[in-house]
Image (cartoon, coloured by chain):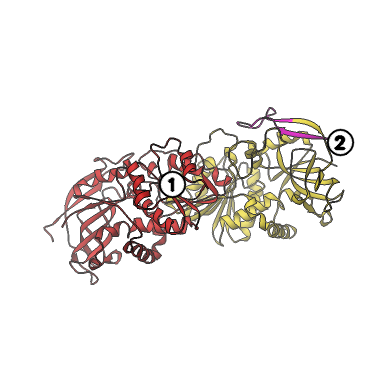
Chain colours: A red, B yellow
Amino acid sequence: MTRLTNRQYFLASRPQAMPTTDNVQRRDVPLGPPGDGEVTLRNLFISLDPAIRGWMGDEPNYIEPITLGDAVRSSVVGRVVASNSAEFEVGDVAMSLGAWEAYTTAPAAGLNKLDESAGIPLSLFLGILGPTGLTAYFGLLEVGRPRAGETVLVSAAAGAVGSVVGQIAKMQGCRVVGMAGSDDKCAWLTAELGFDAAINYKTCGDLEAAIHGACPEGVDVYFDNVGGDILDAALLCLNKFARVAVCGWISTYNVANPPGPTNLWQLVARSVTIQGFTVLDYRDRFGEGVTQLAEWLLAGKIGYREETVDGLDNILPTFLRLFDGSNSGKLVIRIPE
Amino acid sequence: MTRLTNRQYFLASRPQAMPTTDNVQRRDVPLGPPGDGEVTLRNLFISLDPAIRGWMGDEPNYIEPITLGDAVRSSVVGRVVASNSAEFEVGDVAMSLGAWEAYTTAPAAGLNKLDESAGIPLSLFLGILGPTGLTAYFGLLEVGRPRAGETVLVSAAAGAVGSVVGQIAKMQGCRVVGMAGSDDKCAWLTAELGFDAAINYKTCGDLEAAIHGACPEGVDVYFDNVGGDILDAALLCLNKFARVAVCGWISTYNVANPPGPTNLWQLVARSVTIQGFTVLDYRDRFGEGVTQLAEWLLAGKIGYREETVDGLDNILPTFLRLFDGSNSGKLVIRIPE
């Protein structure tokens, strides 16, 4: 162990806009043994999520900003290569809050042991069966609270969260409309995932008119991952007592001082509730969520897309694809064993 | 009856900023007899509320905009001078949705008969025992949902709604902090109404720092009547799972294309809920609300201020005082009998 080095991508400075190689730099550091109660994982998969961009800033957030000089925080799945805990043996596989690094050392208490024998691809525990799937599950059902017959509108609908939101909403008996940034993504939503309609927001022209057209009875639940102009258009299409669930506003993450939405008056005009949340708000119920998502997944009731890119050294440019819309579904870095 | 004329202030054009005498004009029209099932009131009190400004515009709102050419919509209390309904006799007193006019004719079914013999000043049915009191009651208890020991922050706290919100919050066992625009108003809040602290937002300097100072444990419920910079400062002081109740944003009503709040990211950072509402959302429970408010009022548990201005011809300049902060408490036009 003591001869191993750990390659890390660390936060050298806080990005003002898109993170660059000035902000996120590479280093190789010696890998020490795990401390008392700790376990060292050789990372197999590293999750790339829009939320990471938020943690790179120094604004108040739901968890602490990444400390300058620390490896960039991320969820990881890895194989135990050294254990100083009775709970883990070398060879076990676990999910952990880790970083953009080859090896993550963390307290055993914070690790979630995974069962390789179930045959579920391990990367799914970072996506549909992990934070993104749980964000969709709790955000839609607990924050959006859709009722059968209502209309659910989803932004970034071909993304890791949005695609799951829409499919769960269909199972609740809702009309489901997704917004995405390419015809391919829209076709995937309607042809494969069962969305009732999809709007290519880049080519549809007047987005408010397009939403009204796809949601003739108005929008009861808007699951918003995007913010900005798309939120403003959606606000004008809401029904009385509509719920807007917000887990992030990806359109604002790389913009210094983004303007606020201008149509918030609809809050009062339609008695609307806008509720922010993070998946951590539901951590006491993760077991329930994973069990339900796994049941749907194994029964073929939820489709998903995952895009896996090999190689830790590709992590920053791959991460940036989250913000230009060139990915669909869950984006993961793989470091082959 | 047929010889009477009805003086009205009607909407001649929609205001872009502060309503002017070009937008709201006077006319005297013949007063006809009430139609079948209708009642004619000689108005005694006309309510002046910020919401009326919203109805003068043509944006989508919770009720229809005032039609151009119609008298400006408002709540009124009047005495029946002609009745074409078995439910009302001449001499009865009632509250109604009416207008800026000397006489209001309306269907009896929409009128709320008032009991003069109870000795409650009739104007209170437009204020503390009417829409403003009910807005405070339901907005705080149903939207804000304060729990004992929490901190409640109120904007426009010396206004007709805010002053009641704060007093109800005190009765719930909360720490209550009000924001108002003069030292006199602030002194009234703390010395007479029992607020724990008051902030003069015009003189306090850094408003975020002032809120943090007055709310050392953070804000759990923010009752917002104001929007704009005050909302932006309050958003930075919220606790995890805070609730923001919004019944109007008076700072934006006379501004063309007001910018949106810039600190909405706190929605996600603190898992905050922002909920818009109007008192009409609770119309099925008005009886409960009025009963409770009257009980508190008669027991001396709620203080209030009312500013009464005599004369229908003073209605527009008096209305504009809502927007320069020169009124405190409920603002009413009186037309002496």
Amino acid marked by disc 2: Leu
* Residue B210 in sight in this render: no
Q: Which residues are magenta?
A: B1-25
Nearer to the camera, A325 or A278:
A325
Residue sitting at x 73%, y 48%: B126
Q: Which image quadrant: the C terminus of chain A?
A: bottom left
- Image height check: is B130 above or below B5? below
- How many residues crowd around disc 2 within 10 Å: few (fewer than 14), some, or many (20 or more)? few
Q: Which image quadrant: the N terminus of chain A?
A: bottom left
Residue B265 disc label: 1
Answer whether residue B49 is magenta in the image: no
Question: Residue under mark 2: which chain is it in?
Answer: B
Q: What whole-number distance in Å separates the C-alpha atoms at marks 1 and 2?
A: 57 Å
State the image coordinates of residue B197 (x, y, percent, origin top left).
Answer: 59, 51
Magenta residues, dominant SS class: loop
* Number of numbered discs overlaid on the protein picture: 2
**Quarter of the image where one finds residue A4:** bottom left
* Dot 1 or dot 2, earlier in sequence: 2
Nearer to the camera, A294 or B93:
A294
Tell me the residue that label 2 is attached to: B4
State the image coordinates of residue A68 (x, y, percent, origin top left).
Answer: 29, 47
Identify the element where label 1 is drawn: loop
Q: Of all residues shown, which one is farthest toward the left?
A: A3
Identify the element where label 2 is drawn: loop
